[in-house]
Image (cartoon, rainbow, N blue to C red):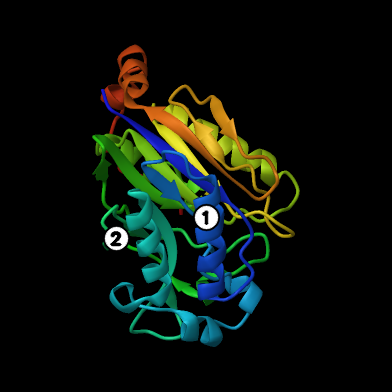
């Protein structure tokens, strides 16, 4: 079975897009060893809550084809010979709303949008829907070095059906780009939810979180048994970790929940 080395960047990004790109490039370049795929956190292009005004956020949004922000990361991907998963504020045709999009940059520098955030963070007093349009469901499942990968963003972690769909689509690894806001029991929730999503789907979860005054950090990797294998703690850092798809196959043989799942339940809300 295949394996892949994941690089996770955990940092705070309070500037404008090119400034934030420069910080990400510097941190990754200094810490890089042998990662095949590097994951940047949510809001690493721009933090909409820091800007505060949806119209101003839309003014900084770009399209993938012409993006100066993605161009900076594309150069780094080519330099390192690694894939990079960027978080991207994408223009729509319905201003001032944008898409919260995961863009996979290949080791050749090609930028490919793979997912737009489905579940917007309208909770705990926040209204992410003031800035973003929701995506339309699961994104692509992409193979990197023979490991099949699904993509999610932050608040999606609270919605298990999305992760089950990725697992049933063959994902060995599901990536989470997060800007997990601090609050009572929020750090504990992040840790437990990532662990449960991994175990209930016998899949790896790799999570890159924003950190700083407003965000909890605690980025890391969770194996198919739900055990945390890597913890980036509460500081700005970059770390790498190997994900072995043979452990996914072993877990699914021992615990065949995906084979046993009733995949076509019809769920209707009461009332």
Q: x and y percent of residue 62 in the render?
A: 39, 78
In this picture, residue 159 sits left or right of residue 66: right
Can residue 143 be seen by looking at this rendering?
yes
Q: Nearer the viewer, residue 48 or 24?
A: 24
Q: x and y percent of residue 248 in the render?
A: 35, 23
Q: x and y percent of residue 228 in the render?
A: 56, 28
Packing grade of label 2 (10 A; few <14, some 14-19, many >=20) is many
| Mark 2, secondary structure of its residue | loop
Q: Which corner quadrant of the image does residue 37 belong to?
A: top left
Q: Which residue is mark 1?
A: 41
Task: Say which mark, if any, is on residue 191.
Answer: none
Q: Which corner quadrant of the image does residue 126 belong to?
A: bottom right
Task: Say if 148 sits above or below 93 in the image.
Answer: above
Q: Residue at x 32, y 72 (%)?
A: 64
Q: Which is nearer the N-term, disc 1 or disc 2? A: 1
Packing grade of label 1 (10 A; few <14, some 14-19, many >=20) is many
Q: x and y percent of residue 183 in the render?
A: 73, 52
Q: Which residue is mark 2?
A: 109
């Amino acid at each position: 079975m295949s394996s892949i080395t994941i690089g996770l960047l955990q940092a705070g990004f309070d500037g404008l897009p090119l400034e934030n790109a420069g910080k990400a490039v510097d941190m990754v370049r200094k810490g890089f060893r042998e990662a095949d795929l590097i994951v940047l956190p949510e809001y690493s292009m721009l933090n909409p809550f820091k800007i505060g005004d949806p119209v101003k956020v839309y003014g900084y949004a770009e399209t993938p084809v012409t993006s100066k922000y993605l161009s900076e990361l594309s150069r780094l991907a080519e330099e390192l010979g690694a894939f990079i998963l960027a978080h991207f504020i994408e223009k729509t045709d319905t201003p001032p709303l944008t898409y919260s999009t995961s863009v996979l940059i290949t080791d050749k520098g090609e930028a490919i949008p793979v997912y737009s955030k489905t579940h917007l963070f309208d909770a705990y007093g926040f209204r992410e829907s003031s800035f973003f349009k929701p995506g339309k469901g699961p994104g692509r499942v992409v193979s990197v070095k023979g490991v099949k990968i699904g993509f999610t963003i932050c608040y999606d972690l609270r919605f298990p059906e999305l992760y089950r769909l990725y697992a049933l689509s063959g994902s060995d690894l599901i990536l989470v780009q997060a800007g997990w806001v601090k609050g009572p029991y929020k750090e504990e929730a992040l840790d437990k939810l990532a662990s449960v999503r991994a175990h209930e789907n016998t899949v790896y979860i790799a999570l890159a979180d924003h950190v700083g005054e407003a965000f909890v950090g605690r980025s890391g990797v969770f194996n198919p048994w739900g055990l945390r294998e890597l913890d980036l703690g509460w500081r700005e850092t970059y770390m790498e970790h190997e994900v072995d798809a043979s452990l996914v196959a072993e877990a699914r043989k021992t615990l065949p929940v995906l084979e046993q799942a009733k995949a076509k339940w019809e769920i209707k809300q009461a009332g």
